Image (cartoon, rainbow, N blue to C red):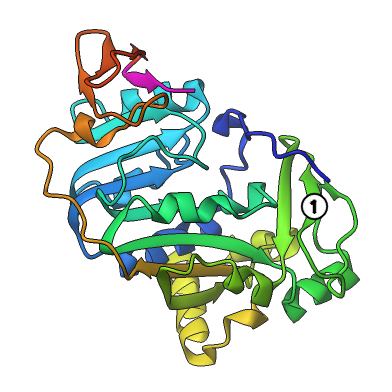
Amino acid sequence: MISENIPDYDSVNFKIDERHEDSLERKILRKSLSGGSVAVDLGGGYGRLTDEIIDSFDHIILIDYSMSNLVRAASKFSGKNVIFVASDIRDPPLIDESVDFIMAIRVIHHYSNLAFLERITSKLRDGGKFLFNFNNLDSPLLILSLINGLIHGRDGNLNPFRPGPQLITVQSNKSRIFFMNYDSFIRSIPHDCTLDKATGAGLLHNAYMERKAESFNLDRLTRAELIFTELVRFPKLFPDVFVEISKCSGNGTKKLTDPFSILSCKKCGGRLALFTNSVVCSKCGSFYQVVGGVVDMR
């Protein structure tokens, strides 16, 4: 069994030239937004997509494990309605039923054990949404790419006919990426949530097509891919799948005026309050330092 280490790498080392992939993610994200009081950006890194949701919610909480990413994000969004928290995203330090929207883009595929999805959705209010994506092992497009050798810079062997999560390693930043079987992944959705929508993507997510995409109008290309996915309406065909689920049980908490009170103590689960250079638990007195504008709860 592969140990579930916490991904902790500086997103400055990401391939930041994946313009089409970034554009597509932004358009899918915008379609999922309905606004509300609190949104959470899980694994948000340096805030690459945070600007897409910042005007739709009263408060944003950006959670990542990398302090360097978060300090960079805190500088980028200084003075905005964003709280930055360093923590394991699999167990977000938030009180239950307090959040209207959670997104985790390019995050879930770092883990093979998906039991933590239930801990994430427990933070949603009744009717709250969770948007995330995963790599689909069943896609015939992925199989074709494997046959043609168009997936570059990765080691490991993917077998589309073998069930269960399968691992590859991205050479550029040594991060681990898991591919999942579509049906088994859908079955892992928490029981108290409903699947609202699954959107296929990733038509151009290989080295060859990414290079070809540079010669086209990016916005038109992205729109064309979204139109195609809407027409096909069979996400199992696509190598990248965006899933939108909603919480269908629970009462939810009252609207919170102090966003720091949404955070919960890692030791006792009590609510937190902000002081000068730390956040303090009102129940057990534990405190967490604030460094560079980031609450360190690792």
> Relative to 188, does residue 272 appear above or below in the rendering?
above
Q: Total of numbered circles in the picture?
A: 1
Label 1: which residue?
167
> Relative to 224, does residue 286 appear above or below in the rendering?
above
> Relative to 73, does residue 224 appear above or below in the rendering?
below
> Relative to 59, does residue 269 appear above or below in the rendering?
above
Q: Front-most of 138 and 219?
A: 138
Q: Is residue 105 left or right of residue 137?
A: left
**Is 57 in the magenta?**
no
Q: Is residue 31 left or right of residue 232?
A: left
Is residue 291 visible in the rendered image? The answer is: no
Of all residues, the one furthest to the bottom in this rendering is 231
Q: Front-most of 203 and 170?
A: 170
Question: What residue range appears in magenta?
Answer: 293-298
Q: Front-most of 268 and 38?
A: 268
Residue 198 x, y percent position in the rendering: 49, 76
Name the residue: 41% across, 69% down: 193
Q: Residues within 10 Å of mark 1 (few under 14, many from 20)?
A: many
Name the residue: 26% across, 64% down: 126
Amino acid, disc 1:
Leu
Name the residue: 66% across, 82% down: 237
Residue 138 x, y percent position in the rendering: 74, 76
Which quadrant holds residue 247? bottom left
Q: Front-most of 126 and 228?
A: 126
